[in-house]
């Protein structure tokens, strides 16, 4: 009887061990497939240079669902700007196996911090603005990201669920993108928007590498570079009295939009700032 029980226990342990081995082998196979697939994707696009930025998100389920959508499309960098909810059990449940995206996420206090090293920032926006921003279709957005992500970091920015990005936050973005929807019911969940736009990027990922329009030795200006130039420009315009601080109007917003449309390099920004410095010396 003791022998029979021992044999039964040994058989149970053996079954548990073999099940564990099967799970480990399958996990290893999945990892190999995922690594091979990710390498194939990177041939056409450096998805590791793409940041999905979610601003002041209010529901943990949306963060988790967005992480799942990203993982589906081989996008791994999630940046949360001042989230209004905890990233806990609900977020991980909705991520449904994409918890690694949540674990590796970056939390920052402001949009400016999230995009400071990015050379292309595209905002998702569904509402009209007093000063229209250059707008892209999802396909055009994917093409721009594909081209610049080869050499620079890029950001795709999603605003809060109920209000979207503020006008001040939109100022930091070069373009906006909207997803065509039923005009009678245009409300789109933020995680669904992440899925749709990441899919548009994914569709191009296996294409042949794009030819570079800029010399490889030239680095594209980052958001920090451009912000420093805009600040310098505003100071000079005030000194030369071109900008009336009592009645500024939309001058700086329009100038910002002008420079954001141009694919400036770091050296070009330095030249522009050198011109401003020369004007300052002449003025004094």
Image (cartoon, rainbow, N blue to C red):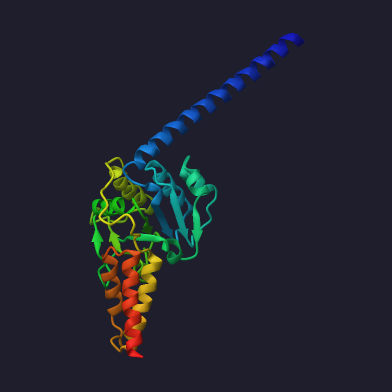
Reply above or below: 129 against 88. Answer: below
- Left or right placement of residue 247 versus residue 162 in this view: left
| Residue 149 in view of the camera | yes
* Depth check, front residue: 228 or 254: 228
Q: Position of residue 184 (x, y in %)?
A: 24, 56
Q: Quadrant of residue 178?
A: bottom left
Q: Quadrant of residue 271?
A: bottom left
Q: Residue reaching furthest right?
A: 2
Q: Residue reaching furthest bottom?
A: 284
Q: Position of residue 35 (x, y in %)?
A: 43, 36
Q: Position of residue 1 (x, y in %)?
A: 75, 8
* Depth check, front residue: 68 or 109: 109
Q: Residue at x 37, y 54 (%)?
A: 190
Q: Residue at x 34, y 60 (%)?
A: 220
| Residue 245 in view of the camera | no
Q: Residue at x 30, y 40 (%)?
A: 206
State the quadrant of the C terminus. Answer: bottom left
* Depth check, front residue: 6 or 254: 254
Q: Residue at x 32, y 50 (%)?
A: 197
Q: Residue reaching furthest front?
A: 217
Q: How many marks?
A: 0
Reply above or below: 3 against 280. Answer: above
Reply above or below: 107 against 46. Answer: below
């Amino acid at each position: 009887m003791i022998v029979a029980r021992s044999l039964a226990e040994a058989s149970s342990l053996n079954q548990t061990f073999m099940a564990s081995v099967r799970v480990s082998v399958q996990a290893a196979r999945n990892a190999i497939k995922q690594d091979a697939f990710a390498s194939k994707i990177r041939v056409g696009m450096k998805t590791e240079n793409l940041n999905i930025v979610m601003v002041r998100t209010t529901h943990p389920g949306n963060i988790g669902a967005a992480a799942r959508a990203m993982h589906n499309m081989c996008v791994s960098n999630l940046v949360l700007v001042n989230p209004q909810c905890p990233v806990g059990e609900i977020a991980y449940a909705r991520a449904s196996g994409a918890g690694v995206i949540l674990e590796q996420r970056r939390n920052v206090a402001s949009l400016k911090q999230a995009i400071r090293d990015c050379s292309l920032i595209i905002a998702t926006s569904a509402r009209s603005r007093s000063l229209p921003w250059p707008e892209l279709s999802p396909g055009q957005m994917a093409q721009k990201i594909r081209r610049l992500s080869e050499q620079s970091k890029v950001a795709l920015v999603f605003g809060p669920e109920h209000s979207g990005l503020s006008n001040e936050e939109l100022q930091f973005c070069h373009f906006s993108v909207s997803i065509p929807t039923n005009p009678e019911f245009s409300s789109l969940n933020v995680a669904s928007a992440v899925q749709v736009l990441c899919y548009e990027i994914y569709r191009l990922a296996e294409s042949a590498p794009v030819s570079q329009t800029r010399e490889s030795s030239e680095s594209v200006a980052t958001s920090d570079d451009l912000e420093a130039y805009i600040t310098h420009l505003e100071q000079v315009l005030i000194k030369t009295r071109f900008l009336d601080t009592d009645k500024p109007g939309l001058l700086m917003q329009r100038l910002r939009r002008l420079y954001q449309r141009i694919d400036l390099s770091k050296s070009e920004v330095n030249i522009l700032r050198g011109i401003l410095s020369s004007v300052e010396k002449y003025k004094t």
